[in-house]
Image (cartoon, helix red, strand yellow):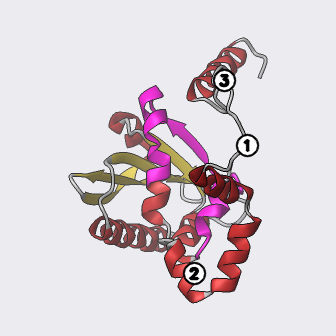
Amino acid sequence: MRPLGPFASPADFAELEDEVRARAEQATTRAPIEPFDAVLVLWDYPGAAIHVQVEDGRAQVETIGADAIGRLDPQVVFETRSDLVRSTMRSVFGQDLITIGYAAQVTLRSRTAMRDNPHERLLNLLSRQQPRWRERLRRDPARTLGFVVGDPSIRYEFKSRLGLSTFKKDRAAPALYGIGDWVDVARRRRVDRREGWG
């Protein structure tokens, strides 16, 4: 996929990299973050990429050439547009622009990387911290309670904790969206492409 709008300038890229670095440093000082190694590839700035690595509780952010990605072999290569990365960091629900809008291409290095979710760790690192339910309840009790009462998953969890749930899970049923299912789908797509079907 390529950007619909204009390409970013070198100054735009440098500003975005600085903002990613500041957000990563802020996030790692706020709470412990599991280690990950990711590269942000920007469709609107194809000559370079942003390498984000978290290790031993510290974040390192640097510019790399697009040709260096293969040598680095990061856990995840996350491709999107610079404006969406910026929105992820700046707006309250910016992460949804990427995760709900599917405005990214994510390439994971291995099955282990699939289980570790480095793409989620990257998005959590970059996105604004969402207020906890206790904070939401203090700020706007009526709205928060209305959401809780209207959400089926929260009602189910509440009933389950009280022992009032009538739903019985079939232990023999396969897991919904099990990781093995996704691996099989990816493997079949690769074979189909190789054979000229997809």
Q: Is residue 176 magenta?
A: no
Front residue (pair 33, 197): 33
Mark positioned earlier in the residue sequence (1 or 2): 2
Mark 3 residue type: Pro
Question: Above or below — where is 112 with respect to 12?
Answer: above
Quadrant for residue 103, please give it.
bottom right
Per the model, the C-alpha gap separating discs 1 and 2 is: 28 Å
Front residue (pair 187, 40): 187
Q: Which residue is mark 2?
A: 137
Q: Which residue is mark 3?
A: 174
Q: Is residue 104 magenta?
A: yes
The answer to whether one can see residue 133 in this image is: yes
Where residue 166 is drawn, which disc sits there?
1
Find numbered disc 1 in the image and state the secondary structure of the residue it sits on: loop
Mark 2 residue type: Leu
Q: Position of residue 119 (x, y in %)?
A: 49, 48
Where residue 151 is drawn, which disc sits there?
none
Find numbered disc 3 in the image and state the secondary structure of the residue it sits on: loop
Q: Position of residue 190 (x, y in %)?
A: 64, 20
Q: Residues within 10 Å of mark 2 (few under 14, many from 20)?
A: some
- Residue stretch rendered in magenta on the structure: 92-121
Disc 1 or disc 3, which is closer to the eye? 1
Per the model, the C-alpha gap separating discs 2 and 3 is: 37 Å
The answer to whether one can see residue 48 in this image is: no
Mark 1 residue type: Thr
Q: Outermost residue toward the bottom?
A: 139
